[in-house]
Each structure stands twice: as C-alpha cells, then as structure tokens.
Amino acid sequence: MRRLVASLPLALLLAACSPSSPTSPQQQPPQPEAGQSAPANATLGSAEWYAWVDHTLGIDDGPNPGSAEWNQTVQRKLGQEAPQSQPGSPEWQQSVDALLRTRVPPPR
C-alpha cells in the first residue's frame, strides 16, 4: 500500500508531461452513455473524455462540460481529493483523469 501511495506522485508527474490539445469552447460533447468505462486512449479535454468524467462523477444534466461551472462541479464532487492546480488547465485535467482511473474498476 505504501508503494502505491509513494508511486502516485511519480505517475502523475509523468502523465502531466504528456501533451494534450485543448478543445474550443463552442464544442458540445455528447452525453455519456450508461455503463461507460474509462476511455482507453481518449485525449484529455476531448468530448469522449468529458463524457466519461460526467458519467463517472454523476454530473449528468449539469453545466456544459469544460465550462468554469462544470470545472467547479468536478472540484466539488472530488472533495478533498480535488487537484490543487487551476481548474480546467491541462495539469488539472491530467490530475482528474489519474484520480478517476484509480477509483474506477477496469471493465471485465
């Protein structure tokens, strides 16, 4: 257990170095589907990624994904585990992604 906790910051640091492309605010991601699992290769900030976070945290019928209000809703849902970086930033998205992937069991 200690190894897992000790290796999490390293994993987050390595993952934060990955490039991500921002989406334009005009794009509206599709609504998540029931039973949706973590997207294997979804780009952070993509419609697929936003839909997965929406579904995972139960933000259905909430604010538009990617908006400042949506980012604050994600922060609130994550509570004390919420990333400390600027909500909506690439670093924040990476932290949210890593946190949710450790919470969500892989598909069987």
Image (tube, helix red, strand yellow):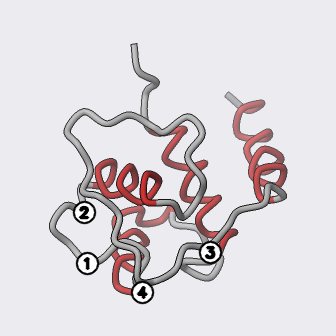
Do labels 1 and 2 touch, CB within 8 Å?
Answer: yes
Name which residue lies at 49% across and 39% down.
Answer: 39
| Residue 104 falls in image quadrant | top left
Name which residue lies at 32% across and 58% down.
Answer: 54
Whole-angstrom CA distance, mark 3 to mark 2, is 20 Å
The amino acid on which the numbered mark 1 sits, given as a three-letter code, is Pro
Do labels 3 and 2 touch, CB within 8 Å?
Answer: no
Q: Secondary structure at mark 2?
A: loop
The answer to which of marks 1 and 3 sits earlier in the sequence is: 1
Q: Looking at the figure, which quarter contains the C terminus?
A: top left
Q: Position of residue 62 (x, y in %)?
A: 20, 72
The amino acid on which the numbered mark 3 sits, given as a three-letter code, is Gln
Do labels 3 and 4 touch, CB within 8 Å?
Answer: no
Query: Circle 3: is it few (<14), some (14-19), or many (20+) Cα within 10 Å?
Result: few
Residue indicated by mark 1:
63
Count of marks overlaid on the render: 4
The answer to which of marks 3 and 2 sits earlier in the sequence is: 2
Q: Looking at the figure, which quarter contains the N terminus?
A: top right
Q: Position of residue 105 (x, y in %)?
A: 43, 27
Q: Secondary structure at mark 1?
A: loop
Residue indicated by mark 4:
68
The amino acid on which the numbered mark 2 sits, given as a three-letter code, is Ile
Name which residue lies at 19% across and 38% down.
Answer: 34
Whole-angstrom CA distance, mark 1 to mark 3, is 21 Å
Q: Is residue 14 left or right of residue 65?
A: right
Dot in front, 3 or 4: 4
The answer to which of marks 1 and 4 sits earlier in the sequence is: 1
Residue indicated by mark 2:
59
Residue 12, above or below 62: above
Dot in front, 1 or 3: 1
Residue indicated by mark 3:
84
